[in-house]
Amino acid sequence: MTNFKQPDYYLLDDLFTDVEKAIRETVRDFVDNEVIPIIEKYNQEMKFPKELIPKMAELGVFGPTLPPEYGGMGISNIAYGLIMQELERGDSGIRSFASVQSGLVMYPIFTFGSEVQKKFWLPKLAAAEKIGCFGLTEPDFGSNPGGMITKAEKVESGYLLNGAKMWITNGTIADVAVVWAKLDGKVKGFLVEKGTKGFSAPETKGKLSLRASVTSELIFEDCLIPEENILPNSGGLKSPLMCLTQARYGIAWGVVGLAMECYNTVLNYSLSRIQFGKPIASFQITQEKLAYMLTEITKAQLLCYHLGKLKDSGKMKPQHVSLAKRNNCEIAKIIASNAREMLGANGILDEYPIMRHLNNIESVKTYEGTHEMHTLILGEDITGIAAYGD
């Protein structure tokens, strides 16, 4: 067990339902007992701890907001956010796995799929009998997904898929990829199953961030996709962007968990680290940094809570998510960096989680829309003027 104590300066727990708190505590115990004891080893070895997958499925963390008939639990979006918070407190790679499975694979199948596709795939994905990935980003098109060059061509027996995707979480271990391609110039979603001729998913090596996560390239060379594997209700760039909104929502909550773990670590450390005959927590500069961390975590918690309320009431806009993702990733990065400095040389040791979280947040701040892109999304919403593209 860890000695984690949740910062809750504004008594936000009073606003959560008993069910939401129970779900959080269950996942928190899982992270403390199953993730934290092993994650540094996997991070060092640059491997994903696959043995955690069935345990996560048993907890119900994959697609938990979906209706029970599709394998979900029908929980609130706040409860889902708390799950993401606790998983990322363990490691960003663990939360990324769950985010992709839930928000980027199960969500598009549920939203754009046929009833046959939903009944076949969703229960299997919820139970982790099948693993999924999401293919949108390309080697030359990240912030501008509309520029994608991956194409699908209608042929007599289905669709012929050609192109490549990059930076794909779970790609190498996935049983099915939700792939976005242009069909007659319009973006459509396709389910590409593992073993499809011409489909390969080599793993990306040499990462210094998200090391306990599988990152891959997806390559399609004349892949024949059966007619029944197109997502019939998808259409246009709006479809994959709706999926990204789901994933970004989870990230906004997740990075609060990362920040909380860094804050808790450095608070405990500063109370026990003695310099000049007293704990470094007694020094003004240390207290100023701790006060900053607690303030920003509290603000981020309140942002997430109200964002969840907006989502549950159907009032949430994608721009609301952009604001939370942008703010919370930024403060999590600053908190992780400050915590690293406050631990001094100890901050670079894997005895503490700080350096791993600091490396991870570099990726999390970048993916699902960079800080700059979310700034421009908000700027357009504020002014009515788009500052990017044509």
Image: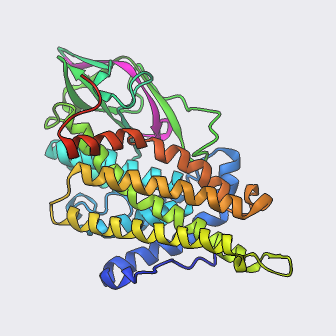
Quarter of the picture containing the C terminus is top left
Q: Position of residue 160 (x, y in %)?
A: 28, 17
Q: Position of residue 187 (x, y in %)?
A: 21, 27
| 224 lies above or below 271 | above
Q: 91 and 373: which one is in front?
A: 373
| 88 lies above or below 118 | below
Is 379 within the magenta? no
Does residue 189 appear left or right of residue 11 in this picture?
Answer: left
Q: 93 and 359: which one is in front?
A: 359
Majority secondary structure of magenta residues: strand
Q: Is residue 283 among what the camera can see?
A: yes
Quarter where residue 339 is shown: bottom right
Is 164 within the magenta? yes
Q: Position of residue 149 (x, y in %)?
A: 32, 18
Rendered residue at 43%/57% (across/down): 328
Q: Colour scheme of this structure image?
A: rainbow
Does residue 271 appear left or right of residue 63 in this picture?
Answer: right
The mark tally for this picture is: 0
Quarter of the picture containing the N terminus is bottom right
Rendered residue at 28%/60% (across/down): 71
Q: Is residue 57 among what the camera can see?
A: no
Does residue 224 appear left or right of residue 352 in this picture?
Answer: left
| 47 lies above or below 294 | above
Q: Residue furthest front?
A: 284
Q: Which residues make up the magenta segment? A: 157-175
Q: Residue furthest right?
A: 277
